[in-house]
Image (tube, rainbow, N blue to C red):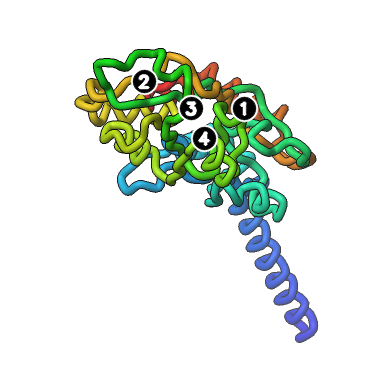
Amino acid sequence: MPAGARSCGRLVQIARAFTLAFLIGLCALPATAQQVVKVGGYDFPPFVDKTAGSASLTFDLIAALNAFQKKYVFEFVHTSSKRRFSHFDEKRFDLILFEALDWGWLGREIEATNVIMHGGTVYVTRMEKYKDQRYFDDLKGKTIWGILGYHYGFANFNSDYEFLKKHFNAHMITSQDGLIEAAVAGRADISVVVREYLQIYLLRHPDVQQKILVSTKFDAVNSYTILARKGNRPDVAELNKILSEMESAGILKKLWGRYNLK
């Protein structure tokens, strides 16, 4: 065989081997790359709880979303209750779970899904013989404890600390446990606690049930949604579809049940 023919034969073999390797490589890749979606969240027990050993509903819902569908990979990004707005504007995240538009989001390029859970904040005080539900009717002259950066109904959802101190003798801290413990100890006349967290706390500390009086009325009723940046994927229509399918499959009911929630 002429040398030129042998060289051409080798080139053909090399080309075939390269083509085969390239095709094998393509087959090893996923058909479509999953889009990463950044999900913001701040300390808001039981939805996000930084306490060691605690469970967080946001983390569990993210895990459930990732297991249920393969188009997106949802990843948690930590923010704070006060900085979540600026972090959203800086595009550090595009979704935030268990949130509501009227918690300071109005006017931004963001929209809400259907309501995924109802809840709210309630008043808690130390149990005393002279106290009944009427104790919560008038907040004047009482020390009120809450969480820094949260929006409360008694203050018309104004979260400014100086405003709260001046008009409501408010003391703001960073721990739901601290609110409950302050009420039990009598340091706080009234603590305003997220009901969903209080339910979990009382399961862990059943002795506290006899030491506190919990209001039957809400300070505020929360309609928790998922907020999504306008123009991004997934949009609220797609999120509503995913959540509806998860609900039909019994996934959400099982997830809420872990936290004694409905």
Left or right: 151 in relation to 185: right
Name the N-terminal-most of marks 1 and 4: 4
**Can see residue 219?**
yes
For label 1, the crowd category at 10 Å Cα-Cα, with few meaning under 14, some 14 to 19 and many 20 or more, is some
Q: Residue at x 66, y 35 (%)?
A: 227
Q: Nearer the viewer, residue 174 or 73?
A: 174
User: What's the residue type where badge 2 is placed?
Assistant: Val
Task: Give me the C-alpha separation between circle 1 and circle 4.
Answer: 42 Å
Marks 1,3: beta carbons within 8 A:
no
Q: Does residue 111 sit above or below 4 in this rendering?
A: above
Front: mark 1 or 4: 4
For label 3, the crowd category at 10 Å Cα-Cα, with few meaning under 14, some 14 to 19 and many 20 or more, is few
Location of mark 1 (residue): 242
Name the N-terminal-most of marks 2 and 4: 4
Front: mark 2 or 1: 2
User: What's the residue type where badge 4 is placed?
Assistant: Phe
Q: Residue at x 67, y 38 (%)?
A: 104
Location of mark 4 (residue): 168
